[in-house]
């Protein structure tokens, strides 16, 4: 057998392998995995759009649509010249005199908020929709003008000081909501899609066939997430502060801690959702099913308080509610971490639960 | 079924005294030395999935420094066997000893010393060739650098190309480079050339031959018999989760079939063809008739072909598409199983 001479001395090679060898930082597997993750994200234009451009477009659009306008002039109509004259004293009302038929038509179609018609014995009848705030406001303004025109004198003298301060506008409410939504979306999608895609392509299996420590693989996702997080949060907050003067009243460090904790929690949730799925379709269905209720219930666009009291404990226990409540409290009320303990607790509990279960369920192939 | 396997082994030993038997014949004093030169020893391997038994009691021995081929049609259990050996799949029962180590106790050291190419892995398309290899290199304690590995598989001009822009053959060469960055002692190649065009296959074969000469042990699976004949010192043919033949390609061909194969088409007349009469022709060992094509194992071509022509004339059957070729491993597989490899 001539082969015997060609056999390499396996034991000699083993000894050679054990020789200690310094490692350059850049050659460390964790660094390489993180760099690769980061590069993959940067080379995915669609992902960059959803992470960076989308929240800004949304904030800009909603900020413009719901901007605070100077007190609006309400359109109302009358059918009598006398009432028209009394109402013209009120600057916040635009009065139009119409015949009864077209006035009723205008009220029905919402072109006017209120119709004032003469009643019996010199009285005035207001016709309006009491479920419409504009109708109620118009009723008060019109009645005040009519009464004052008829000679009423208010017993108490009153005057107004107007304040339109940053921090109480819709955009101030919206920016922390969008920030929370963005933290959730980018973490869950960033984690979910890439993990499932790597599993589908058998790349996960190929990686576990190398000596790569498995925890490094998962850790690299977290590290690249944190790198992206700085840019993500910075852009949304910077945009809000620059264009709409949205305040950050709490400590920036506390805000960073909340963002980091939120992002880690949603990453763990994403990992859990992606722990077994073999196809992008299955994973994206699962991710949307989990995220959609939170987009609606967790107070991104409107206060979660609007939902009935019965479901409030459930809504409060959702990670997105906790994240957004904490962000709002920090940015708008200047709350510190101690005051945010309940929200931080909810996020921490979700983080630990999702991560532990995800590791148990995770399928490498 | 075990009896059949046994019978085939006996046949190898019996038919040709020049043929080495599956285990090297040495005097017993040498046996311990021989055992230490085994790079891989698999015993009684069994693996069943929910609906199918993939491996049904397999024994394998791969010698250090050889290129060993695991052959068989799709679904024969090759990939399952290889993935058990690679420590990616746990067997239901059986034992795997690889480089003198075991997966349950020495996984970490083993991983450092294996080079693995899986069947159809898609590497990340957004990364460049260099970035991919730099990543894989970072997992290993030693081995060639990324640039060196690129040179090994002749992908230099693609160093900074995205993986997504590579051709199929280039992707396979990159996958091979990923298997080589750890300077492995044992290289697993699972169907390395499946789906490649002939030129890309030959290019990959040249590369694998170079690595063979550097003394690495290779376990290669393929359903291309020409690939095994070209690259492997020894092959095991698998079918339905079992090994049905073992030996060097030449031994297998010599022991199972005659030297030459003669094939012709009888067309529409195949139904009236008198096959037993063909079998009686001098120098013909076996005849198979299938879908109008007749294949004959022939020992003496110069006698058999004129006799065949005469016999067909006598049977009044017009002859089309007569061809002859030297017997290949494909013919071995047909002789052993009665099926072609691509009958799927």
Image (spheres, rainbow, N blue to C red):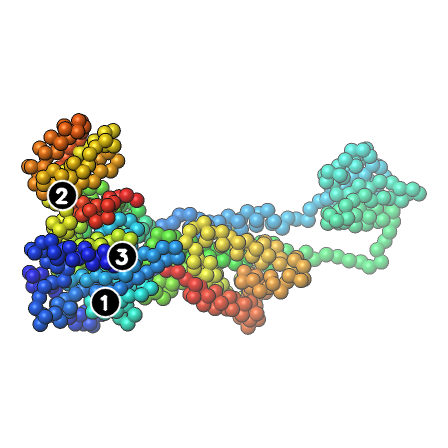
- The residue sitting at 81% across, 43% down in the picture is A127
Q: Residues within 10 Å of mark 2 (few under 14, many from 20)?
A: some
Query: Where does the image place residue A285, in percent across and percent down from the top left?
Result: 49, 51
Q: What residue does disc 2 label?
A: B285
In the image, residue B168 above or below residue A103: below
Q: CA distance from mark 3 to mark 1?
A: 25 Å
Chain for numbered disc 1? B
Q: In which quadrant of the rendered view does residue A335 lie?
A: bottom right
- The residue sitting at 80% across, 58% down in the picture is A157
Q: Secondary structure at mark 1?
A: strand
Q: What residue does disc 1 label?
A: B97
Chain for numbered disc 3? B
- The residue sitting at 78% across, 39% down in the picture is A77
Q: What residue does disc 3 label?
A: B1
Residue A335 appearing in the image: yes
Residue under disc 3 on the same chain as residue under disc 1 = yes
- The residue sitting at 6% across, 60% down in the picture is A2
Q: In terms of sequence position, does the residue under pointer 3 or pointer 2 come before the other?
A: 3
Query: Where does the image place residue A89, in percent across and percent down from the top left?
Result: 79, 44
Q: In which quadrant of the rendered view does residue B267 lie?
A: top left
In the image, residue A143 above or below residue B21: above
Mark 3 or 1: in front is 3
The outermost residue toward the right is: A121
Is residue A349 left or right of A212 when viewed as pictured?
A: right
Point out which mark residue A307 bears: none
């Amino acid at each position: 057998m001539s082969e015997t001479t060609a056999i390499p001395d396996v034991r000699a090679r083993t000894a050679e392998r054990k020789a200690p060898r310094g490692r350059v930082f850049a050659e460390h597997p964790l660094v390489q995995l993180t760099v690769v993750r980061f590069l993959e994200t940067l080379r995915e234009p669609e992902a960059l759009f959803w992470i960076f451009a989308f929240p800004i477009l949304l904030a800009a659009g909603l900020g413009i649509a719901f901007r605070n306008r100077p007190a609006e002039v309400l359109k109302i109509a009358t059918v009598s010249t006398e009432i028209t004259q009394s109402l013209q004293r009120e600057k916040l009302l635009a009065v139009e005199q119409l015949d009864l038929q077209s006035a009723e038509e205008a009220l029905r179609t919402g072109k006017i908020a209120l119709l004032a018609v003469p009643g019996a014995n010199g009285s005035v009848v207001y016709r309006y929709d009491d479920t419409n705030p504009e109708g109620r406001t118009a009723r008060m303004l019109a009645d005040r003008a009519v009464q004052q025109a008829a000679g009423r004198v208010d017993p108490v003298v009153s005057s107004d000081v107007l304040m339109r301060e940053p921090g109480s506008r819709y955009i101030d409410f919206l920016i922390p909501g969008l920030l929370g939504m963005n933290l959730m979306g980018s973490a869950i999608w960033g984690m979910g899609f890439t993990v499932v895609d790597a599993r589908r392509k058998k790349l996960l299996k190929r990686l576990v066939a190398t000596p790569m420590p498995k925890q490094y693989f998962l850790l690299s996702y977290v590290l690249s997430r944190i790198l992206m997080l700085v840019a993500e949060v910075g852009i949304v907050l910077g945009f809000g502060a620059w264009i709409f003067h949205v305040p950050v009243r709490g400590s920036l460090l506390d805000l960073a801690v909340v963002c980091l904790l939120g992002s880690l929690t949603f990453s763990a949730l994403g990992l859990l959702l992606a722990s077994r799925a073999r196809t992008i379709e299955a994973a994206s269905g699962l991710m949307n099913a989990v995220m959609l209720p939170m987009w609606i219930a967790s107070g991104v666009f409107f206060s979660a308080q609007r939902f009935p009291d019965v479901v409030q404990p459930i809504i409060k226990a959702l990670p997105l509610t906790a994240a957004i409540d904490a962000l709002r409290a920090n940015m708008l009320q200047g709350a510190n971490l101690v005051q945010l303990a309940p929200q931080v607790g909810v996020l921490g509990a979700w983080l630990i639960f999702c991560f532990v279960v995800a590791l148990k369920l995770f399928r490498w192939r | 079924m075990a009896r059949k396997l046994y019978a085939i082994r006996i046949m190898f030993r019996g038919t040709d005294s020049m043929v080495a038997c599956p285990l090297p014949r040495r005097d017993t004093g040498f046996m311990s030395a021989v055992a230490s030169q085994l790079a891989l020893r698999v015993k009684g391997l069994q693996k069943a999935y929910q609906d199918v038994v993939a491996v049904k009691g397999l024994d394998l021995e791969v010698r250090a420094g050889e290129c060993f081929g695991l052959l068989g049609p799709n679904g024969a259990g090759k990939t399952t066997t290889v993935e058990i050996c690679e420590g990616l799949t746990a067997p239901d029962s059986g034992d795997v000893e690889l480089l003198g180590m075991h997966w349950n106790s020495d996984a970490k050291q083993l991983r450092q010393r294996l080079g693995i190419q899986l069947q159809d892995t898609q590497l990340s398309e957004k990364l460049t060739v260099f970035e991919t290899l730099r990543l894989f290199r970072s997992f290993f304690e030693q081995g060639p650098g990324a640039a060196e590995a690129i040179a090994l598989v002749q992908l230099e001009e693609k160093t900074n190309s995205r993986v997504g822009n590579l051709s199929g053959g280039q992707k396979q060469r990159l996958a091979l480079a990923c298997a080589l960055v750890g300077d492995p002692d044992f290289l697993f190649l699972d169907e390395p050339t499946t789906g490649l065009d002939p030129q890309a296959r030959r290019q990959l074969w040249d590369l694998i031959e170079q690595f063979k000469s550097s003394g690495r042990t290779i376990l290669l699976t393929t359903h291309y018999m020409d690939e095994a004949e070209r690259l492997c010192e020894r092959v095991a043919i698998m079918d339905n989760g079992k090994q049905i033949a073992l030996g060097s390609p030449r031994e297998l061909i010599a022991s199972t079939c005659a030297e030459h194969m003669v094939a012709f088409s009888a067309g529409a007349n195949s139904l009236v063809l008198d096959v037993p009469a063909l079998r009686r022709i001098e120098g013909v060992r076996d005849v198979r008739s299938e879908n109008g094509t007749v294949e004959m194992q022939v020992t003496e071509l110069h006698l058999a072909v004129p006799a065949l022509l005469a016999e067909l004339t006598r049977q009044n059957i017009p002859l089309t598409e007569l061809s002859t070729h030297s017997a290949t491993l494909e013919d071995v597989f047909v002789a052993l199983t009665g099926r072609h490899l691509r009958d799927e």
